[in-house]
Image: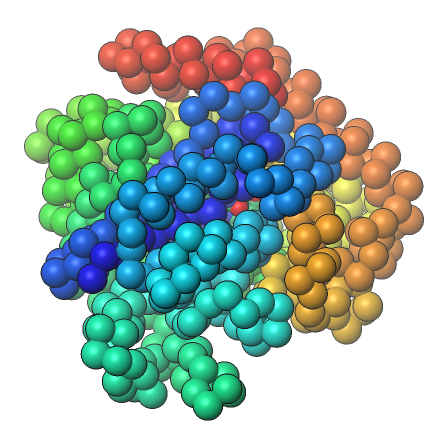
Amino acid sequence: MKILLVNPPFYKIMGFFNRYFPFALVQLGTILQNHGHEVLVYDGDLVLNPQYSDYSLLPKLYPDYLKSFRDANSQVWLDLEKVLDEFKPEVVGISIYTTYIASSYYVADVVRKVLPLCKIIYGGPHTKEKYNEVCENVENFDYILRGMCDLTLPQLVSSIQNDNCSLDRISGLTFKRDGQYVHNPIESKMIDLSVLPIPDRSLLYNDHLYLSEDMGMIMTSRGCPYSCSFCSTDTRKISYRPTEQVIEEVIATKNRYGTIQFTFKDDSFTVNKTRVKELCAQIISRKLKICWECNTRVNLINEELLKLMKKAGCNFVKVGVESGSEYVLKKMEKTTTLKKCREAANLFRKVGIHWTAYFLIGIPGEREKDIIETLNFITEIKPDMALLGVYEPFPGTAMFHEGVEKGLVKPRMSFEEFNSTNPNDYYKSNAKVQNDTIEWDRFKYLENLIKNKARLYNKKYVNIFRMFKAKFPVYRLQPSILKNDFKKYLGY
Ligand code: B12
Ligand code: SF4
């Protein structure tokens, strides 16, 4: 069958900088291709000329995003129509993240308008928890697949090909029978990654337009054994790809797109140290000459491991420090301590790997004094980069449920609400209430204070120099990346 997988436009409509290619769709597309289907992956959020890289502008710019749904001449939607018209798929898969749900709904409208007979499948992180809400909100779809779909999507496509036979047997499928929705349970949260093919990036429409480093996103594992209460990863288990397969993907991407800066985007890359050591040893012994970054946790590193990672080309590590308050770390169920964060900071400095610390403010129960402690903690542990986010309730998380109990979060959102609300405020009972402990005006004051301090901190010459130094080997070989980073920096 002809299958189009669509990553809905979001950042592009507002002119924001965006990163990477839609990994999940390329992975799913490759699997479908191996089952004999003709597949195209359309990334509606491929931004070629970004205007902004400061995402705190979103509250000001989101009306442009919502307005685009009512503008028949909006270029992003005309572009999608053109692809549908040219490729003429029989099945379209659309991904849904909570943040861009309004766009995912609109993509289906466009598909129905251009190709009324085409089957529409929704999938992605938002559908796992909120499939009932999707059914209530929109009509323009045929199926929702929940959870990991690597094995179930080909099953569904084959059912569609055979007049909807055996739909009952597909794990995590929502479909309509006699006018009623049927929701099959999800049988397993995890899958054996060794059976999956290497994601074929050439399935992307206009694959040559991506920056080489944006093609360098690789997942070497899936899942996370931790259960931070704000995070929607709920696997509690982790499954790994064979090291040899990861190396093959690195080599194939480097050969085709010239990628030298890679990102291992696993939730927590260093959970299994033996595996990381094996991967590093392979990168070194096979002289791959690449740089790479990864995400991990402050409790999952040690000096020996960091040294080896550095030797194998690791130039950036990103960790969720989250808060400078022990009380808040406990509320987040982070299972780390300030002491562990300090130790990690010392280790990164000692080994000399650029490290970014993520911080999160505004969770339920957080007090003013906790935010001040976070501010002080940034200047105490001195990460090379401090990135600050404001808490947003994502469905399926423990904190979402806590928010519902406290009246801060509404369990459902209507179609109209998605189409009139700033995506940062989705599921908040009141856009002008961040949490139950700090008054709105005071919270906004503290948010601006800490964001401005973090911005100034990141712009210190010494921190800019460290960033430049970490990426110098890449800039030397690919000056276009330096130009791009410079533009991003100016917009920040
Ligand atoms: C990489 C990543 C990013 C990358 C880019 C992603 C990309 N271009 O591919 C960047 C850094 C840009 C990013 C940004 C954001 N991200 Co993010 N990201 C991830 C991360 C770490 C990995 C995603 C991934 O590729 N996983 C591997 C693939 C194979 O798994 P998957 O995405 O779940 O896909 C499977 C199923 O969901 C399903 N599926 C997915 N799409 C589709 C489509 C169809 C049609 C079907 C049938 C099935 C299907 O099948 C897939 C294979 O089994 C996840 C965490 C995680 N562990 O998944 C968070 C995660 C997806 N991100 C999340 C969030 C919140 C964000 C941000 C909002 C963060 C922020 N505050 O700004 C932004 C929003 C981005 C946007 N455009 O709206 C949340 C999503 C929560 C939600 N309910 O939507 C996650 C789950 C993190 C978390 N644990 O809370 N992210
Ligand atoms: S925040 Fe990170 S460590 Fe915590 S559960 Fe989510 S992925 Fe795991």
Q: State which quadrant residue 289 falls in.
A: top left
Q: Looking at the picture, how far across and down is residue 184, in whole percent?
A: 41, 84
Of 194 and 341, nearer the camera is: 194
Q: Nearer the viewer, residue 280 or 189?
A: 189
Regarding residue 289, the answer to whether it shows in the image is: yes
* Lateral position of residue 165 relative to residue 197, left or right: right
Give residue 223's position: percent from left, percent from top: 38, 61
Q: Which quadrant is the C terminus positioned in? A: top right
Q: Nearer the viewer, residue 68 or 117?
A: 117
Q: What is the quadrant of residue 287 in the picture?
A: top left
Find the residue positioned furthest to the bottom.
178
Task: Please give the name of the residue rendered at 43% of the width and 87% of the height, measured from the top-left corner.
Answer: 177
Q: Nearer the viewer, residue 9 or 405?
A: 9
Q: Is residue 39 above or below residue 376?
A: below
Q: Is residue 450 left or right of residue 159?
A: right
Please determine whether, in this image, residue 190 is positioned above or below residue 483.
below
Residue at x-position 47% and y-position 55%: 113
Residue 315: percent from the left, percent from the top?
A: 35, 27
| Up/down of 123 relative to 263, above or below | below
Question: What scheme was used to colour the molecule?
Answer: rainbow
Q: Using the image, determine if residue 453 lies above or below residue 374.
A: above
Q: Quadrant of residue 296?
A: top left
Q: Quadrant of the N terminus?
A: bottom left
Q: Residue furthest left?
A: 286
Question: Image point 68% across, 53% down: which residue?
Answer: 419
Residue 124 seen in this snapshot: no
